[in-house]
Amino acid sequence: MPIPTEMDAWAVERPGPISSGPLVRVRRAVPVPRNREILVRVRTCAVCRTDLHLAEGDLPPRRPGTVPGHEVVGHVVGAGPAAERFAIGTRVGVAWLRSTCGECRYCRRGDENLCPASTYTGWDADGGYAEYLTVDERYAHPLPEALPDRTAAPLLCAGIIGYRALARAEPPEHGVLGIYGFGASAHLTAQIALAQGARVHVMTRSERARALALDLGCASARGAAEPPPEPLDAAILFAPVGDLVLPALEALDRGGTLSIAGIHLSDVPSLDYQRHLFQERSLRSVTANTRADARAYLDHVAAHPPRVTTTPYPFARADRALADLAADRVEGAAVLVMDDS
């Protein structure tokens, strides 16, 4: 199929409340791949809460008219003059991390997610709410063949970030894990923890999410700020709600760790040291991911395919998908599907 010169896309024109319509459908030129870039024809793109933060201005756009989307599955249809990693027609995934310098002390020690020069898909450069996008071939990911497009898309951020957040929480073998918030990333992370032998308790305000958690095998599912039925060895906060940091810390057993998985969090109330941090409880953030995280997670899902709950939306309803995400009307992960998929 010949590559057109123009394409449809959704761009954040004026960040603001989702009710104000910050995401607008536009016509754009199809990008031209340069150097080691590949041109990807988008088939599906999962909808991440980070996209909502960008649209509403919680995450200030780094360029005007940004096209969101960083959980992209598509096929290579073009390549820059120095690109040689993927053959035309190869299915690839495009994730949040877009580039790093490769030379700073963080990159050299394997912490490229902390690179000060790092850039991100759908923030520094246009992402997958479009018919085509470009990406450096070194930051694209081969995908397990057995995973359908709609199943694979949420894994590229929700899955990878959850995988890193679980590692940062350091639950002991066969320990007790608490999960606060139960959307796209959390429902994938719970399955990893359960496969590793953890007992998982979920705290979330959504009744449908609580039902999904129990259906997946979690030991309990309660309200967002309710105490779990037993002390937690580790916990992960997925909901971008700073108020939940305190009950999550209070629920930790001695020596437990809380990791915060989101890129944005509302203000955290004052901590009471004795009540929330004493007895060697730890609080950790999670910042993006490395390509090694992505490889490890995709290898894991190739061997242990997860149950991925998705809510599909036609590409033409991307604005509705974001609005439903904002209102907690999405079960699992929302996924944009190209009209001809």
Image (cartoon, rainbow, N blue to C red):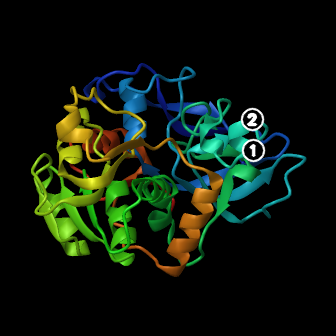
Amino acid type at circle 2 is Cys
Q: Is residue 20 left or right of residue 261?
A: left
Percent position (x, y) of residue 199?
A: 25, 71
Residue under circle 1?
108
Q: Are marks 1 and 2 in contact (CB under 8 Å)?
A: yes
| Residue 333 visible from this viewpoint | no
Residue under circle 2?
104
Question: Is 327 placed above or below 235 here?
Answer: above
Asked where in the image residue 125 lies, by quadrant, the reply is top right
Q: Is residue 82 left or right of residue 256?
A: right
Outermost residue, right direction?
81
Percent position (x, y) of residue 341?
A: 50, 62
Asked where in the image residue 216 lies, by quadrant, the reply is bottom left
Q: Residues within 10 Å of mark 2 (few under 14, many from 20)?
A: some
Q: Is residue 94 left or right of residue 78?
A: left
Question: Is 271 placed above or below 8 here?
Answer: above
The one of 46 and 192 positioned closer to us in this rendering: 192
Which residue is pictured at 29% across the width and 29% down the height? 266
Which residue is pictured at 58% across the width and 72% down the height? 299
The one of 264 and 30 positioned closer to us in this rendering: 264
Percent position (x, y) of residue 78?
A: 78, 52
- SS category of the residue bearing label 2: loop
Distance of label 1 from label 2 (alpha carbons): 6 Å
